[in-house]
Image (cartoon, helix red, strand yellow):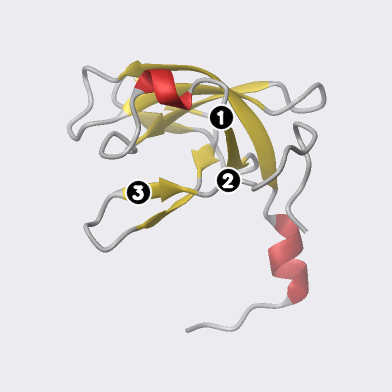
Amino acid sequence: METIQWSDFEKVELRVGRVISADVFKEARHPAYIVHVDFGEQIGIRKSSARITDLYSPEELVGRLVVGVVNFPRKQIGPVMSECLITGFHNSDGAVVLCTPESDVPLGAKLC
């Protein structure tokens, strides 16, 4: 494992957002959703292509808090321009389990 400096970690903008919509990404090569996340007034709403279909339905995602990286460059994924990375962990079956705060926190709050 590579060691990084604290200043490297500080550059990553891991922020809390609330999913406001999630739709099946029909054109994706692998099952995915197009997810819109509200990161609060300062950052706004960002779109992401998220391969989280194994454990979550679009209806279950709406209203859920998630942790996302909001300062990566935008990335073209098929016809969708992804504007943030929603974070999670692979479980023992390989499905992605979302990284979420266990209590309500303000939208846009930075991971510390």
Q: In this orientation, which residue lies closer to the viewer: 30 or 95?
A: 95
Q: Position of residue 60 (x, y in %)?
A: 42, 25
| Label pair 1/3, CB-CB below 8 angstroms | no
In the picture of the structure, the residue carrying the numbered disc 1 is 64
Mark 1: which secondary structure? loop
Q: Amino acid at mark 2?
A: Thr
Label 1 or label 3, whichever lies nearer to me, is 1
Mark pair 2, 1: CA separation: 8 Å
Q: CA distance from mark 2 to mark 3?
A: 12 Å
Q: Quick one: SS at disc 2?
A: loop
Residue 41: mark in rendering? none
In the depicted structure, whether residue 8 falls above or below residue 97: below
Residue at 80 percent of width and 34 percent of height: 106
Q: Is residue 92 left or right of residue 34?
A: left
Tag of residue 96 = 3
Which residue in the rendered view is the most extreme toward the front?
A: 103
Going by the numbered disc 3, the residue's amino acid type is Val
Residue 100 image label: 2
Q: In what element is the residue under mark 3?
A: strand
State which tag comes first along the sequence, 2 or 1: 1
Quadrant in the rendering for residue 57: top left
10 Å neighbourhood of mark 2: few (<14), some, or many (≥20)?
some
Circles 2 and 1: CB distance less than 8 Å?
yes
First of labels 1, 3 by sequence position: 1
Q: Position of residue 37 (x, y in %)?
A: 58, 25
Quick one: 37 or 46, which is closer to the camera? Answer: 37
Residue shown at 76% from the left, 35% from the top: 108
Residue 27 in which image quadrant: top left
Dot 1 crowding, Cα within 10 Å, few <14, some 14–19, many 20+: some
- Identify the residue at image location x=28%, y=50%: 95
Where does the image place residue 103, in percent across and percent down from the top left? 71, 43
Q: Amino acid at mark 1?
A: Arg
